[in-house]
Image (spheres, rainbow, N blue to C red):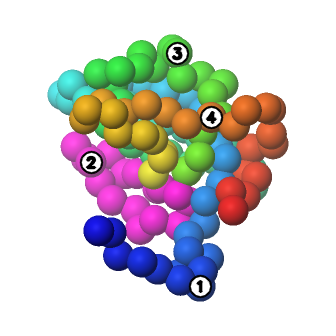
Amino acid sequence: MEEIIDINEFAKLDLRIGKIENAERVKGSKKLIKLEVDVGAETRQLVAGIAEEYTPESLIGKLVPILANLKPVKLMGVESQGMILAVDVNGKPILLHPDRDVPAGSRVR
C-alpha cells in the first residue's frame, strides 16, 4: 500500500495547468521530448518521456497538469523545470487534460 499523507503535505505540491507552446525531440533519445510550457506567469522548459506515444507536433496547444515546484534536473543534458503528470498504462504514458478550456497557470487542487 502507498504511504498515506495528510493535506498539509499535499498542499506543498504546486500543481498547475500548463499550455504546451513548443515541443521537440531531445537529440539522442528515443523517449524524451523537450517542451516549452506556459504556466501563467512564465514559460518553463520541461522534459518528458513521452516520445514513444506522442509526436512533438501533436502536443502543441495541449493543456496538461504539471508539478511546478519540482527541483530542476538535467535529462540527457537538457534541464527540466517541472514534470508533466500522466497516467501509466502498461508502462506507456497517457496525458491528462482538463475537460474544458482553462487559463494556463490555473491551480490544480
What residue is pinned by disc 2?
75
The image quadrant where one finds the C terminus is bottom right
How crowded pointer 3 is (Cα within 10 Å; few <14, some 14-19, many 20+) is rated as few
- Tell me which numbered mark, 2 or 3, is placed earlier along the sequence: 3
Foreground mark, 4 or 3? 4
Task: Kindly report the distance in space between the C-alpha atoms of the residues bearing marks 1 and 3.
Answer: 36 Å
Task: Kindly report the distance in space between the C-alpha atoms of the residues bearing marks 1 and 4.
Answer: 25 Å
Foreground mark, 2 or 3? 3
Residue 93 appears left or right of 59: left
Q: Compared with residue 41, is residue 99 higher up or lower down, i.e. above or below?
A: above
How crowded pointer 2 is (Cα within 10 Å; few <14, some 14-19, many 20+) is rated as some
Residue 16 appears left or right of 59: right
The residue nearer to you, when weighing 93 against 55, is 93
What residue is pinned by disc 1?
8
User: Residue 92: x and y, percent?
Assistant: 30, 30
Is there a contact, CB below 8 Å, between mark 2 and mark 1? no
Question: In the rendering, which numbered label is found on residue 97?
Answer: 4
Amino acid type indicated by mark 2? Leu
Amino acid type indicated by mark 4? His
Whether 80 is among the magenta residues is yes
Q: Compared with residue 94, is residue 69 higher up or lower down, i.e. above or below?
A: below
The image quadrant where one finds the N terminus is bottom left
Whether 74 is among the magenta residues is yes
User: Residue 72: x and y, percent?
Assistant: 40, 62
**Local secondary structure at mark 1:** helix
Is there a contact, CB below 8 Å, between mark 1 and mark 3? no
- Tell me which numbered mark, 4 or 3, is placed earlier along the sequence: 3
Q: Which residues are magenta?
A: 67-82
Question: In the rendering, which numbered label is found on residue 58?
Answer: 3
